[in-house]
Amino acid sequence: MHNTHTSAIVVTICIVNDNALAVGTPDINDEFWQQSIAASDTEIFDVPIALTDTNDTITIYADTASKVNAVAFGYTLPDQS
């Protein structure tokens, strides 16, 4: 994540489980991780997250809109069923 702003910004990651097989709406109970990123700084975070259903999602929020660039990388595990 890169903060392009002139002030520190708090970034929050939410893991949102599906809602009756549809994408769910995040709320305070879905918060998984939160971190402040200093002004003009780039931070790399290793946050272990497993999405287990088709419509589970990850949502990232920042205190200030349009000031944080975020990229997520992951992989898919083979189906063991």
Image (cartoon, grey):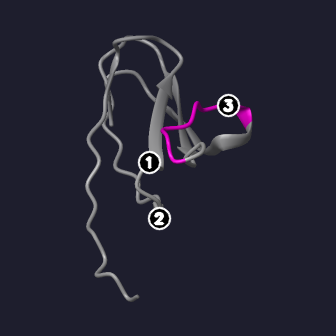
Q: Position of residue 57 (x, y in %)?
A: 45, 45
Is residue 32 in view? yes
Location of the N terminus (image quadrant): top left
Label 2 sits on residue = 50
Asked if residue 27 lies left or right of residue 25, the reply is right
Location of the C terminus (image quadrant): bottom left
Query: What's the residue type where badge 1 is placed?
Result: Asn
Tag count in the figure?
3
First in sequence: mark 3 vs mark 1: 3
Which type of secondary structure does the marked residue at label 2 adopt?
Answer: loop
Q: Residue furthest front?
A: 20
Label 1 sits on residue = 55
Where are the magenta residues, as a range? 21-28
Question: Which residue corresponds to the image point at 34% horizontal and 49% vertical from the top-left?
Answer: 44
Label 3 sits on residue = 27
Which type of secondary structure does the marked residue at label 3 adopt?
Answer: loop
Which mark is in front, 3 or 1? 1
